[in-house]
Image (cartoon, rainbow, N blue to C red):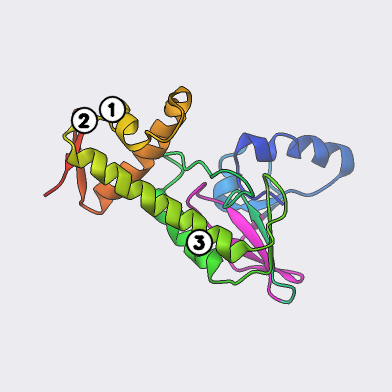
Amino acid sequence: FLTHHHVDHVSGAAALKQRMGLPIWAHRETAERVSFEVDREIEANEQLGDWTALHTPGHASGHLCLWNSKTRQLIAGDMVASIGSIVVEPGDGDMAVYLKSLESLKALNARVAYPAHGAMIESPVERFSAYISHRLWREVQILSALDQGDAELPELTRRAYSDVNPAIHWLAERQALAHLLKLQADERAQESAGVWSLRH
C-alpha cells in the first residue's frame, strides 16, 4: 500500500513485489506517477477490511491515509510527522488543499496516528491543530512581508522566514511559494515578472 508517489515512499516497492510477490496498491494519481505497475488502484473511501482509504491530497495529489474507525487509528503517511513539518511542494502539492485535508483528518478525532516519518503520535488532534495553526501563522508572516513592499521570492522568504536558518532558505522558498500561490488563488496576492505584491 503506497501512501503517495514520492521517492522516499516508493523506491523499494518494485523490488519487494518481485522478491516477495506482494501486490502494490495505490491511488490512481499515484499510479500515474510511478515507473512500475500498480496492481490495484484504490478509490477514496474504499473499504479495505477494517480500514477505510481516505484521499488526502495537498502534500501529494494522490495521497492516501488509512483510517480504522473501530480502533480510531490513523495511518497518516506524509500528512503529519511527529517532529518538524511537512513540505508542500508547488506543482503536485497545494497549500489550500493540504490545509483542507488536515482539517478533515483532525475531525476524525483519532486516538493515535502513525506518520511515515517519526514516532507514533499519541495526540493526533493536537498535532493536526498545531500544523494548521503554524501554516496560518506563516501565511500572516508572508502577508506582512508583502506589506513591506513588492519583492521577488528570495527577498520575501528572507522577510517572512527570519526565524529560520538562512542556510535552508532554499527550502523555505518552496514553502513561501506554496503560500503565495494560495494567496494568489484567494485574490490576496499577485505576481508579475517574478515580483509579488499585495492585491488590493
| Label 3 secondary element | helix
| Vertical side of 49 occupied by 198: above or below | above
Residue under numbered circle 3: 129
Residue at 75%, 35% (x, y): give it.
12
Q: Amino acid at mark 1?
A: Glu
Q: How far apart are the two marked residues, 2 and 3, measured between alpha carbons? A: 31 Å
| Label 1 secondary element | helix
Magenta highlight on residue 67: yes
Can you name the residue that lies furthest to the right here? Answer: 20
Can you name the residue that lies furthest to the front here? Answer: 163
- In the rendered structure, find residue 155 and report the number of the disc placed on it: 1
**Among numbered discs 3 and 1, the one appearing first in the sequence:** 3
| Label 2 secondary element | strand
Discs 1, 2 touching: Cβ within 8 Å: yes
Span shown in magenta: 41-69
Whole-percent x, y for residue 143 in the image: 25, 45
